[in-house]
Structure formats: structure tokens, C-alpha cells
Image: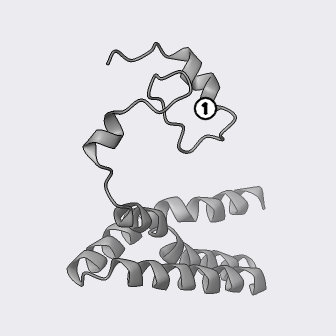
Amino acid sequence: MPILIGIVLAIPMIVRVFAIPLATRRADRHDALRMAIVIAATGAVVGYGVVGLAQGAAAIAMAFVFASVFYTPIMPLADALRPARAPAASDAPTGRCGCGARPRSLSAASGPAFCSMSPPRAT
């Protein structure tokens, strides 16, 4: 049983190799980035609902594949939707110590710790 759990948990990593290029290509080709995000999010919600209702190892694995096909492209699509920063804003130091460190995916509490580890930027 533990090996089956490992296989099911590896499914999104395998599916993302195929799902992300296909989804991003279709979104770019049809110039429908926002609609692709909406479709992917809706499919992921439905897919994970099916995972919750699935009974048996094969049904859970197939439902997880279905959910992963829709879930894995959401972050790359959302990243492509994010507008680019202006060059002047990206060059300005914004950390508390003025070093320019921007903790994005870390919690706000860890930002000052990383900022204090780096030397101040020369302006």
C-alpha cells in the first residue's frame, strides 16, 4: 500500500511534463490566458472533488491524473498573466536594510532575516 501512495503522489510530477506545454501553447495560440486559468481552476476543483469521491486504487489514480491535468498549468499561466515590473521599480532598494532583497515566496517575517544576511547594495 505505501508504494501505491507514492505512485499516486508522483502523478502530478509526471503529468506536468505534458500538461503545462499543451495548456500554455493553447492559451498563447488563442490569446485566451485568463480563460485558460478559469478553465484550469474549474477543472482542478472538479477533479479534486472526484478524487474525494473515488473508491479504489485505480479510480483514485485516474481521478488524480484528471485533476493534475488541470491543476499543474495554473501557476505557469498565472505567472504569464502577471504584468512586468517597470525597470525603475525593480532597481530601487525595497528591503528594510536597503539591500533590495524582496522576499516573495517566503513569509513576511523571514524577509528581514534574509535582508540582514546580504550586504547593502551600492547605489
One can see residue 55 in this view = no
| Residue 109 vs residue 69, the one in the foreground | 109
Q: Farthest residue toward the left? A: 29
In the displayed structure, would residue 34 be above or below residue 113? below
Q: Left or right of 82: which side holds 102? A: right
- Pointer 1: residues within 10 angstroms few (<14), some, or many (20+)? some
Which residue is pictured at 51% across the width and 59% down the height?
13
Residue picked out by circle 1: 111
**Which residue is rendered at x = 64% and y = 60% of the image?**
9
- The answer to whether one can see residue 57 in this image is yes
In the displayed structure image, the side of residue 94 where residue 117 appears, left or right: right
Rendered residue at 32%/68% (across/down):
21
Rendering coords of residue 55 (x, y %): 78, 84
| Displayed quadrant of residue 43 | bottom right
Q: Quadrant of the C terminus?
A: top left
**Is residue 108 positioned above or below 53 on the image?**
above
The percent coordinates of residue 117 (x first, y second) are: 55, 16
Image quarter (top left, top right, bottom left or bottom right) of the N terminus: bottom right
The residue drawn where x is 53% and y is 43% is 104
Q: How many callouts does the rendering have?
A: 1
* Residue 7 locus on image (x, y percent): 63, 61
